[in-house]
Image: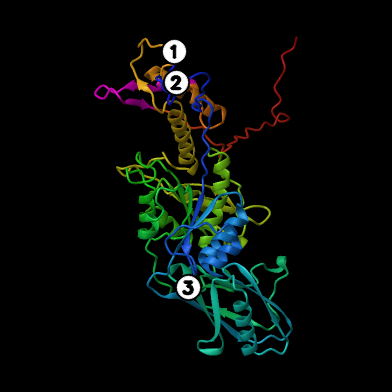
Amino acid sequence: MPIEFSSFPNSWRLPLWWAEIDPSKAGTGVINLSALLVGQMASGSTALPNVPVSPGDPETAIAWFGAGSMLADMFETFFANNTAQELWCLPVSDPSGVAATGTIHVTSPPSQAGTLTLYIAGQQVPVLVGASDTELTVAGNIVTAINAMTSLPVTAALGGTGAQVVDITCKWIGATGNDISMGDTLGGAQAAQARPVGLTLAYSGTLASNLAPPNFGFLSGGTGVPSFTSAIANLGDSLYEYVALPYTDSTSLLAWQTEYGFTSSGRWGWLRQQYGQIYSAYRGQYSSILSWGQTQNGPQTTVMDVEPAVPSTVWEVATAYCAEAAIAFSNDPARPLQTLQLYGVLPAPRSYRFPLTELNVLASNGIATQTVGPNGLMEILRETTTYQLNLYGVPDTAYTDMTTLATLSKLLRNQRQAITTKFPRYKLADDGTLFGPGQAIVTPSIIRAELVSEYAQDEFNGLVEDARVFAKNLIVERDSTNQNRVNVLYPPNLIGQLRIFAVLAQFRLLGAQQTTQPQS
């Protein structure tokens, strides 16, 4: 019996023609790499907390998570960058704590009519101003304009220390509300924005003059961070390859990095084999971001720098970063992300951006970096992970860039698909065993040939290089104590990325240094 069937029985005696279908030589691996947005929903929302759901479109996200909620805002930002990815959301409830607050103080009335262009969390809020408006009138119009824009993450009311003061309150409880900015005319003359003549405003939470413009401030006083224990448990074994996580406190990062860790219980561990990456953002001045980055060390985590004067929020930057990475890595996990533009987020004004020298240091200390392109859009500069040290605290570059794990996950999934499809119910024998053709038997040399062939295909697809070196270093052997086990040393050489093009311009001044030609 040289040919073995999986289901057609040898005892069958009825004529004539019977066919068993075997797909083991035909299929190719197709995995749907979905994205996951982690954020707070509004109080009273219809979505179940800590349970992943897929709204499908921004309107449904607003209906489920609440207008102006963090998660609805993240969904809209993701859609602005990537509409092709399967997208899930993990809504969490407010923690115990306090909502962030701030104030806008109208300190003098206008003398001419015009339009005041407010910015709340990077969103424009136009406010009509009349020439005869009082401070109270302007303040009331600001309240009306803010509350009319339900997409804003805040509500407004008159009050505070005077009737001309606008109280701004975050729509949710938590420390993340402290990242909500307030300002006006941030577009400047280039965007035809100017305060109406005579009108002056003062914002709470202003920064030093070298960090942000004077007409720019932040909410403050927000406390509390959600617990993710139940939320992570409810993810189960579903694949979520790209996670946008706007929480960078040590407790939240530890919980998510453990879930996406390399232990047997983590998604990168041998038992679960689910993989995935975490995308976040961190706001601060250069020194504070640098100090924070030096305390991080997650190979599966990337955190993008956000200058103090960036009007958009960290959850919007993290989401846009995640969305662009998701579509790029789904197409080709080995290509660098540099120059990919982040839509739906506003960069810091030109004079308040980190210079290249500081960005270079941040990239060397576990911080992903962004810059601003010639069209004024924020774009990815280097998709650095937070990984910097090995288990002994020695500097290590094994996981410096997100492309490394993205490529490895693709290679391992390709290999798993090939092995499990072609040898699902095979017997295992030593090399040199004489068995008839068609037998469901595999040997180490047959497996080795399959891995070499798979590697050649991966090389053709631009994921790896040096197939000859790989074949030389590949080891496939039958376990010496368990005859049913094969051990493989798999040494892929991941393809590199063109990140630096260095030129030594060694010029000549031939007119001043003419070489004498020998006479014939």
Between the C-alphas of marks 3 and 2, the distance is 59 Å
- Nearest to viewer (mark 3 / mark 1): 1
Tell me, yes or no, whether the two marked residues, 2 and 1, touch with CB atoms within 8 Å: no
On the image, numbered disc 3 is attached to which residue? 44
User: Tag 1: residue type?
Assistant: Pro
Q: Quadrant of residue 3?
A: top left
Residue 255 lies within the magenta run:
no
Name the image quarter holding the N terminus: top left
In this rendering, is residue 419 above or below 265?
A: above
On the image, numbered disc 1 is attached to which residue? 437
Q: Which residues are magenta?
A: 468-489
Task: Bin the neighbour count of mark 1 within 10 Å (Cα to Cα): few under 14, some 14-19, many 20 and up.
Answer: few
Between 405 and 57, the one nearer to me in the picture: 57
Secondary structure of the residue carrying numbered label 3:
loop
Q: Quadrant of residue 271?
A: top left
Left or right placement of residue 482 versus residue 195 in this view:
left
Between the C-alphas of marks 3 and 1, the distance is 66 Å
Q: Residue at x 56, y 27 (%)?
A: 460
In this rendering, is residue 196 above or below 234?
A: below
Task: Bin the neighbour count of mark 2 within 10 Å (Cα to Cα): few under 14, some 14-19, many 20 and up.
Answer: some
- Nearest to viewer (mark 2 / mark 1): 1
Secondary structure of the residue carrying numbered label 2:
helix
Earlier-in-chain disc, 2 versus 1: 1
Earlier-in-chain disc, 3 versus 2: 3
Left or right placement of residue 445 versus residue 150 in this view:
left
Residue 482 lies within the magenta run:
yes
On the image, numbered disc 2 is attached to which residue? 471
Residue 65 in percent (x, y) is at 52, 66
Q: Is residue 347 visible?
A: no
Between 330 and 362, the one nearer to me in the picture: 330
Residue 442 in percent (x, y) is at 39, 19
